[in-house]
Amino acid sequence: MKRPRVILADDHTLILEALKNLLEPEFEVVGMFPDGLALMEGAPALNPNVIVLDIGMPSMNGLNAGQRLKQAIPLVKLVYLTMNHDPDMAGEAFRLGASAYVLKNSAATELQKAIREVVRGGYYVTPLMTKGMHGSFVQNFKLRKSTTPLTLRQKEVLQLLAEGRSMKEIAFVLNVSPRTVAFHKYTMMEHLHIRSNAELIEYAMRSSIVAA
């Protein structure tokens, strides 16, 4: 029987290596990426069954990368492995196509269990986060209010702005014109009733669009 093909994405090299050692030989680790942008660009060619990714990553966070990847590879299963135990963040992850949400401080065997579950077509959430929930935990999470009213492209622009990139750099990274970047920036500011760059970056931090 063929082993499920798994991609790993985390901005800590030591974590990537530890995860690879944990998951092989049960799963075939076909790629490892240090940020969301590299993941989004490299993953489709590797034909993965499962992508294990963190939420807080540079260049493009895991939620944005995951949303893009579900468009590019609809059948891929997204397993979020994160320190973030905020139920609203889990809700956002499931709304954007996640199949599992695992906390990094859980037992290592939990990640293996989550991957087995999603390969079978199921869902998985760290039990710690589903305590006291009745009915489908996925529906419970999905029904939570969205943490941000922004579009996917706006969130991508906002993360790069918050990381200190210039309009020109952002345009290059996202393969759009600087004018398009400026349009997204000022549309966001108007929409969020924000008047300065500092307020915009504060909003990005508060919404976990960038890792603090």
Image (tube, rainbow, N blue to C red):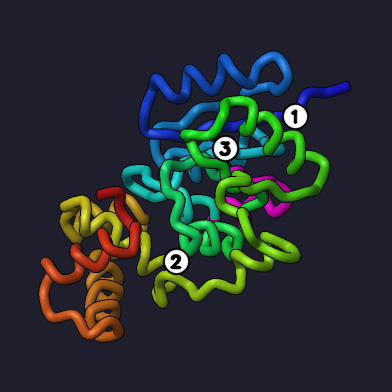
Residue 127 spot, x, y in % from top left: 62, 46
Against 65, residue 19 (above or below) is: above
* Residue that mark 2 sits on: 152
Image location (x, y in percent) of residue 141: 60, 64
Residue at (33% x, 46% y) in the render: 59
Residue 50 point in image, percent of width and height: 67, 38
Label 2 sits on a secondary structure element that is helix
Q: Which residues are magenta?
A: 67-79
Q: Which residue is mark 3?
A: 52
Asked where in the image residue 23 lies, by quadrant, the reply is: top right
Q: Quadrant of residue 188?
A: bottom left
Decide: few, some or many residues near mark 2? Use Cα within 10 Å; few <14, some 14-19, many ≥20.
some
* Lower sequence index among marks 3 and 2: 3
Q: CA distance from mark 3 to mark 2?
A: 20 Å
The quadrant the N terminus occupies is top right
**Which amino acid lies under the numbered mark 3 shown in the image of this protein?**
Val
Residue at horizontal 37 percent and vertical 46 percent from the top: 56
Q: Alpha-carbon distance for marks 1 and 2?
A: 29 Å
Q: What residue lies at 78% left-to-right and 48% top-to-bottom?
A: 122
Indicate left or right for 83 with 25 as reference.
left
Mark 1 in CB contact with mark 2 (< 8 angstroms)? no
Residue holding disc 1: 4
Q: Position of residue 4 (x, y in %)?
A: 75, 29
Structural crowding at the residue carrying mark 1, measured as other residues with C-alpha within 10 Å and reported as few (<14), some (14–19) or many (≥20): some
What secondary structure is marked by label 3?
A: strand
